[in-house]
Amino acid sequence: MLFVYYPKCSTCQKAKKWLDENNIKYTERHIVEDNPSYEDLKDWYKRGGLPLKKFFNTSGLLYKDMKLKDKLPEMTEDEQLKLLATNGMLVKRPVLVNGDTVLLGFKEAEWAEKLK
């Protein structure tokens, strides 16, 4: 199981604490120091079955500064994946990848249902 997170993110800290409290083993990956690649993102997108828009950190400053709310609808899936791969701060976090389960953001009830 891969846990991709940003250590300063409070939601990521809650998710990490929850994983630890529930004795769930995972491999950590810092989303900025080891930015998800185009291949990673494409794989997670296909495996998770989630809309690509869900992969964007829509509340992040970078998302807002780049005016992506207006630009994304005009972009192809491939262009969006390439953009996500340029900077980990664009990616919704935390990301938890376990087989065909890809969880974005931390919602305790959803994680409990999918991981137990």
Image: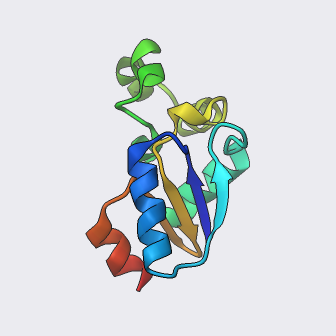
The location of residue 32, given as percent across then percent down, is 65, 37
Is 21 drawn above or below residue 27 in the view shown?
below
Please tell me which residue lies in front, 107 or 20.
20
Instruction: Decide if residue 50 is in sight here.
Output: no
Number of marks present in the image shown: 0
Please tell me which residue lies in front, 107 or 12.
12
Instruction: Decide if residue 8 is in sight here.
Output: yes
Outermost residue to the bottom: 116
Outermost residue to the left: 109
Residue at the location (66% across, 29% down)? Answer: 86
The location of residue 112, given as percent across then percent down, is 34, 77
Q: Quadrant of the N terminus?
A: bottom right
Q: Quadrant of the C terminus?
A: bottom left
Q: Quadrant of residue 68?
A: top left
Q: Quadrant of residue 47?
A: bottom right
Is 108 drawn above or below residue 80 in the view shown?
below
Residue at the location (41% across, 41% down)? Answer: 53
The location of residue 90, given as percent across then percent down, is 52, 32
Is 71 drawn above or below residue 28 in the view shown?
above
Residue at the location (39% across, 53% down)? Answer: 105
Residue at the location (53% across, 79% down)? Answer: 24
The location of residue 12, given as percent across then percent down, is 45, 51
Give left or right: position of 8 versus 84: left
